[in-house]
Image (cartoon, rainbow, N blue to C red):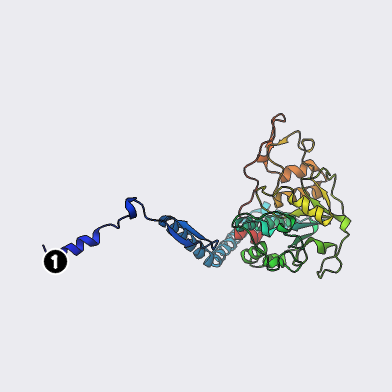
Amino acid sequence: MSEAEPCTASALEPEQPLSGTGTAPPVTIVHPITGETVTMTKSAAKKLTRRVMREQKREATKHERRARERARRKERRKQSKEKDKNDPSAVALVRSPKKKPEPFDARVVVDLGFDDLMTPDEATSLAAQLGYLYGVNRSSSHPFRQVIFAGAGSLSGQALGFEPPPSGAFSYPEASTSETSLFQDRVGQHMEGKSRGMWRRWKNVCLLEYGGLESLWDTSATSNLEPCAKEDVIYLTADTDDTIECLEPGKTYVIGGIVDRNRYKHLCAKKAEALGLRMARLPIDPSFLDGQHMQARKVLTVNQVFSILVGWSETHNWTDALKRGLPARKFNASAEEPDVPDADEEATKSVTSDKEETV
């Protein structure tokens, strides 16, 4: 036996587990996402590291991927135009004049002042819903005169007495003050990055950077908004018995901008009460739904509520508006069956960057 053989055999021996347990000991690391010190198995730590590296790589190459997709869409449009040149019916359709939209003289505000109560994923989902909302208004025959995205004001979610989710709290740069910028909040940061700032140029959309909802009627606030009477502002929430009969010109309707999977009960109602605003609910009742009952909670996403409002502005009919905005999964054809919770209250978890750019 040569002298080198024992070293070779020793190098091939596997690492022995500690204390005869048969498993590697746990490791303590700094979580790359939350920044907290956590203890986990070595295998789980490696998986977490690989996942973070994949996400970083995807983030670093997102602009290249978007550029390639825009080039593909441009080529498809070019091919479609070439094909339509030889189709008389398609040519006639293209040449037919498009009816000019007739704006409905009311405003809709999305209250984005609950950033401190959402996890990062929930803030991302809310940003996606804003993209859908804009697309609905832009393609409507009777769009709202103005859509406003309002950032945090003097009342944050925590100031109203609600606790943030574990590991999901967001600290405003100037917490609970009128100096908090919409663009510094997580939803604003996501919109700035995901749409590359395009939301600043959305037609008939106003970004209310400072002051929150209060600046709608506060004449001393520095904004380009036309101030309105506080009595003309209506906060939409299911936690009230006051039901809207119709949308009124000159009014401002507020939608609570939060994705919370129904964690915070009466959140929007408490904020409206604290601000002294009128509250009202949409008429989501069987009488307007051909006798159908909701089989899920009457908690809707921001874009679903907005679709209902736009549906009414176009038809002046709540039945048609509700059918347009409510997803079919929320209905139960049998009126005798009781309402049961819906496990998926958040309809839109993600939107591709292309969708946000084209809506």
Image quarter of residue 274: bottom right
Extreme-bottom residue of the structure: 222
Q: Quadrant of the N terminus?
A: bottom left
Of residue 71 and residue 333, the one placed in the foreground of this image is: 333
Q: Is residue 204 visible?
A: no
Determine whether 2 is above or below 126 in the image. Answer: below
Of residue 171 and residue 208, the one placed in the foreground of this image is: 171
Extreme-left residue of the structure: 1
| Residue occupying the point 78% across, 57% down | 109
Extreme-front residue of the structure: 19
**Amino acid carrying mark 1 in the image:** Glu
Report the residue marked by disc 1: 3
Of residue 118 and residue 297, the one placed in the foreground of this image is: 118
Image quarter of residue 324: top right
User: How many marks can you see?
Assistant: 1
Instruction: From the top left corner, tell me how far across and down residue 211 is, in percent.
Output: 78, 65
Instruction: From the top left corner, tell me how far across and down residue 342 is, in percent.
Output: 64, 41
Instruction: From the top left corner, tell me how far across and down residue 345 is, in percent.
Output: 65, 46
Q: Quadrant of the C terminus?
A: bottom right
Instruction: From the top left corner, tell me how far across and down residue 63 is, in percent.
Output: 56, 67
Q: Is residue 62 visible?
A: yes
Mark 1 secondary-structure assignment: loop
Image quarter of residue 139: bottom right
Mark 1 Cα shell of 10 Å, populated few (<14), some (14-19), many (≥20): few
